[in-house]
Amino acid sequence: MQRPEAWPRPHPGEGAAAAPAGGPAPPARGREPAGLRLQEPSLYTIKAVFILDNDGHRLLAKYYDDTFPSMKEQMAFEKNVFNKTSRTDSEIAFFGGVTIVYKSGTDLFLYVVGSSYENELMLMSVLTCLFESLNHVLRKNVEKRWLLENMDGAFLVLDEIVDGGVILESDPQQVIQKVNFRADDSGLTEHSVAQVLQSAKEQIKWSLLK
């Protein structure tokens, strides 16, 4: 799902703190391959993205602000969200002052969390982009087993869509191209790969301890 050409202006106090008008440009994310579309980051912000299994256990999660500052608060929030959404056919929920859009797979639940003021269509575009990008990376097997075996790729996908809470991309084809480029680029050093893998291991450890 491609992002519309122009999003509505953000509500006062939302997004501006993450990317103030006239402020310094975001740091460069590395050399881009020829032919990739250049696009300004959205001023909309995401509070969190997480993926849970069918039992509500965390598989992957990233929080971008201090709404849920501690691991304990994050896990409690995820449990409450799962209990509220796992048995419904809806794709959107309002819970604890935030807006949540979600999608279920074979044995996974994907969630994107924004403030109560955020545009639901914008949040849904991020969710759709995440799902379709993972569907490609996991070779059309968006399932727990394949996600755990390809966690490094999943984190690369998420980092191309959202950076520091700011939406960078909502076109899955662009995300896939950038992920493939980063994986092949010599700039992706062994050290940076090790960082991604260590982050994945931490996520798995917490899900197993749950």
Image: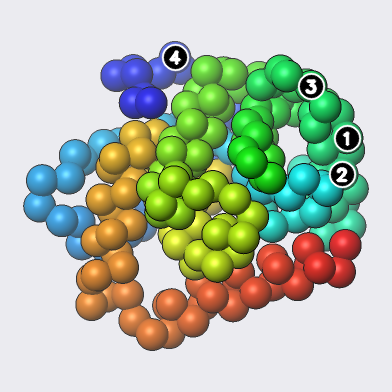
Pointer 3 local density, CA inside 10 Å: few below 14, some 14–19, many at least 20 = few
Amino acid at the residue labelled 1: Asn
Measured in 3D between alpha carbons, the distance from the residue under mark 4 to the one under mark 3, in whole angstroms, is 30 Å
Pointer 2 local density, CA inside 10 Å: few below 14, some 14–19, many at least 20 = some
Residue occupying the point 86% across, 69% down: 209
Residue occupying the point 40% across, 18% down: 7
Q: Earlier in the sequence, mark 1 or mark 4?
A: 4
Colour scheme in the image? Answer: rainbow
Q: Are marks 1 and 2 in contact (CB under 8 Å)?
A: yes
**Which mark is on residue 83?**
1
What SS does tag 3 mark? Answer: loop
Q: Nearer the observer, disc 2 or disc 4? A: 2
What SS does tag 4 mark? Answer: loop
In the rendered view, would you say 82 is above or below 143? above
Residue furthest to the bottom in view is 190
Q: Which residue is mark 2?
A: 79
Amino acid at the residue labelled 4: Pro
Q: Which residue is mark 4?
A: 8
In the rendered view, would you say 44 is above or below 37? above
Q: Earlier in the sequence, mark 3 or mark 1?
A: 1
Measured in 3D between alpha carbons, the distance from the residue under mark 2 to the one under mark 4, in whole angstroms, is 32 Å
Pointer 1 local density, CA inside 10 Å: few below 14, some 14–19, many at least 20 = few
- Location of the C terminus (image quadrant): bottom right
Q: Which residue is mark 3?
A: 88
Tell whether 50 sits left or right of 192. right
Amino acid at the residue labelled 2: Lys
Measured in 3D between alpha carbons, the distance from the residue under mark 1 to the one under mark 4, in whole angstroms, is 32 Å
Q: Are marks 4 and 3 in contact (CB under 8 Å)?
A: no
